[in-house]
Amino acid sequence: MRKLKLIWDFKGPAGQKTAEHHLFHLKEYINVNDLDIFTTGVETLSDMHSLAYLVVDESEMKPIRDSLRPHRGQLYSQN
């Protein structure tokens, strides 16, 4: 089954802290809704661009996407 990475981008000098804060709320959402999502995180792409993300099975993506409204998504591959 394909997995999708739902992504929220945060830009500017406070992007890293904002992404970390957003991840806290994503984890709250996962717990409150009792979801089987175990892959989440924050990535820093530059000093002015960070992102928060979670990884879902493609079959479960639509209700999560509609509820959380990520900025973008992509296929997830474990490297």
Image (tube, grey):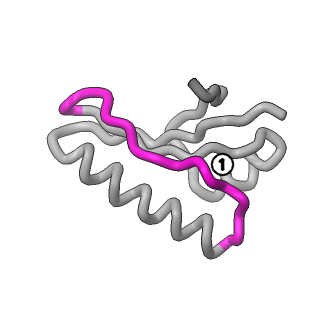
Residue 32 part of the magenta segment? no
Q: Picture coordinates of residue 25 (x, y %)?
A: 46, 65
Q: Quadrant of the N terminus?
A: top right
**Total marks in image:** 1
Q: Which residues are magenta?
A: 33-48
Residue 8 vertical position relative to residue 21 in the rendered view, above or below: above
Left of 75 or right of it: where is 51? Answer: left
Q: Residue at left 32%, top 28%?
A: 45
Left of 31 or right of it: where is 16? Answer: left
Q: Residue at left 53%, top 49%?
A: 40
Task: Place residue 59 in its image quadrant.
Answer: top right
Q: Amino acid at mark 1?
A: Arg
Q: Picture coordinates of residue 50 (x, y %)?
A: 32, 37
Residue at the limit of the structure toward the bottom, as seen here = 32
Query: Label 1 crowding class (10 Å Cα cut-off): few <14, some 14-19, many 20+?
Result: some
Q: Picture coordinates of residue 44 (x, y %)?
A: 31, 35
Q: Residue at left 33%, top 41%?
A: 10
Left of 67 or right of it: where is 13? Answer: left
Circle 1 is placed at which residue position?
A: 65
Residue at the limit of the structure toward the left, as seen here = 13
Task: Place residue 30 in its image quadrant.
Answer: bottom right
Q: Quadrant of the C terminus?
A: top right
